Image (cartoon, rainbow, N blue to C red):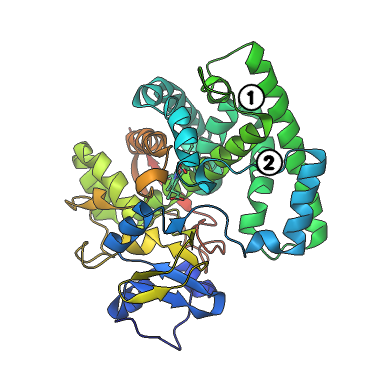
Amino acid sequence: MPTTVSRMRGFTDPEVQDNPFPYYRERFQQCPVWHEDDVDLYVIAGLSEAREALMDVDTFSSAPARKGATGSPVATAYVKALAERGWARATTLQRTDPPVHTRYRQILNRIFTPARVKQLTPLIDNITEDLIDRFADSGRCEFVADFALPLPGIFIAEQLGLDRSEYKTFRRWAEAMLCLANRPTMTMEEAMEEVEVELEAQHYLAAECERRRSQPTDDLLSLIVHAHGDDEPFNMHELQDLMHQLVTGGFETTTGALSAAMWLLATHPDQQQLLRDRPDLMSNFIEESLRIDSPVQGLWRSAKCPASVQGMDIPEGASVMVRFGAANHDPRVFDAPERFDITRDNARNHVAFGFGAHFCIGAALARQQMHSAFTALLDRFSHIELAEPLPVPAHDPSFFLRPLKVLPLRLEPAR
Ligand code: HEM
């Protein structure tokens, strides 16, 4: 039975955000489901409970909750500016429930196929080698800025019709698109600055979508515009929301995955050597790093009706967070969950990409980016280690992501 742990610090605590794993461990000793009192949030943290909740779309809805950030005056002004001078957020894909979700997903599944990932792999390899060339001779890099941000950033930017040299513009657009989620304490003035940047992105994307309607190309943007086939085409509101999800869902997450996996390798020389000796462990290394340090620690649902999970009563209308990062440390499933072990036989059993209807549509693409990146990095450098200790805290504050601030590395070039 769940008990209230009154003096325990929760997700709003900067220390817990920087390193949530001791908190998960402590909570698991009580119950894998709990209530975060200060933010009135029900947390589902056990692996089997998380999977069940993610499958139960009749109880746990992905549609935006009635309360939350979108209700603040700053967020309201932001959305109003988008609506008046660009495109207000339509509700598509990730923020919908079946059967509306099913239609979007079926159409987009035509694009995000294993064959497409295979076709895109030479481009991913090319960006990877290009980025490594820029720092290889110096024997050092700041991995987040020099690699983990630009690899997925350049990749998505090019798929949206931008040139490789325009990566900085794209990065600024992505920051603006994410500001409501990442900067809940933004002032009105700051929000109005950000919305101008997002409006610039929206108008650029609208023009590129229209161009592709009449002149299809082979990038993801064009494929999304034409994915409807014989069905009703997506309108511009829907297209803008889908672009937004591609950028917010595919950029920071992949950056987080690359940074965390590199940090794990650099700080576990025995595992790094094992991976060099046994390249057949590459896929398991990727799964183990996604498990142990999941880039998306949790996402929101809202309870459509009263529910009970592990004895915890969740009232109708409650905000719920499925905590992927904690589920991936469930001690009932993962032996010594905080141990980084690239030979772990059930590493792939994680929910870092979610589960059920909303399972990450870009999972294969993200895995390929990690595979291309670490194959090339281990090939080009015979030893990788931290060049200096990480700052404290090491991560930027976030309720649900784990953005590593910097990762300074010393790299021994391979002869
Ligand atoms: C390591 C990198 C990534 C991680 C950890 C990750 C994680 C996730 C998670 C946990 C979900 C489930 C959301 C939910 O249940 O509400 C999700 C969904 C989604 N992801 Fe990813 N993701 C990654 C990469 C990508 C990439 C590269 C793309 C696109 C190119 C992408 C696009 C999406 C989209 C559009 C959804 C919504 C799918 C739906 O609702 O049907 N993600 N992702």
Check disc 2 and report the residue beneath it.
173
Question: Would you say 22 lies left or right of 250 here?
Answer: left
**Residue 30, image x, y percentages:** 31, 80
Determine whether the residue tagged by mark 2 lies in a helix, strand or loop: helix
**In which image quadrant can residue 200 be found?**
top right
Asked if residue 142 shows in the view, the reply is no
* Residue 373 vs residue 135, the one in the foreground: 373
**Residue 110, image x, y percentages:** 43, 25
* Residue 53 vs residue 171, the one in the foreground: 53
Q: Going 45% across and 88% down the picture, which residue do you hit?
A: 7
Residue that sits furthest to the bottom in the current view: 7
Q: Amino acid at mark 1?
A: Asp
Q: Going 55% across and 57% down the picture, which residue do you hit?
A: 405
**Residue 140, image x, y percentages:** 48, 45
Number of marks drawn: 2
Residue 60 vertical placement versus 282 (above, below):
below
Q: Residues within 10 Å of mark 2 (few under 14, many from 20)?
A: many
Determine whether the residue tagged by mark 1 lies in a helix, strand or loop: loop
Point out the quarter of the image occupied by ligand 1: top left
Q: CA distance from mark 2 to mark 1?
A: 14 Å
In which quadrant will I find the N terminus? bottom left
Check disc 1 and report the residue beneath it.
163
Question: Would you say 81 lies left or right of 155 here?
Answer: right
Q: Which circle, 2 or 1, is nearer the viewer?
A: 2
Residue 371 vertical placement versus 358 (above, below):
above
* Residue 10 vs residue 41, the one in the foreground: 41
Question: Would you say 262 lies left or right of 144 here?
Answer: left
Residue 160 vertical placement versus 200 (above, below):
above
Q: Which mark is residue 6?
A: none
**Residue 299, image x, y percentages:** 47, 57
**In which image quadrant can residue 188 be found?**
bottom right
- First of labels 2, 1 by sequence position: 1
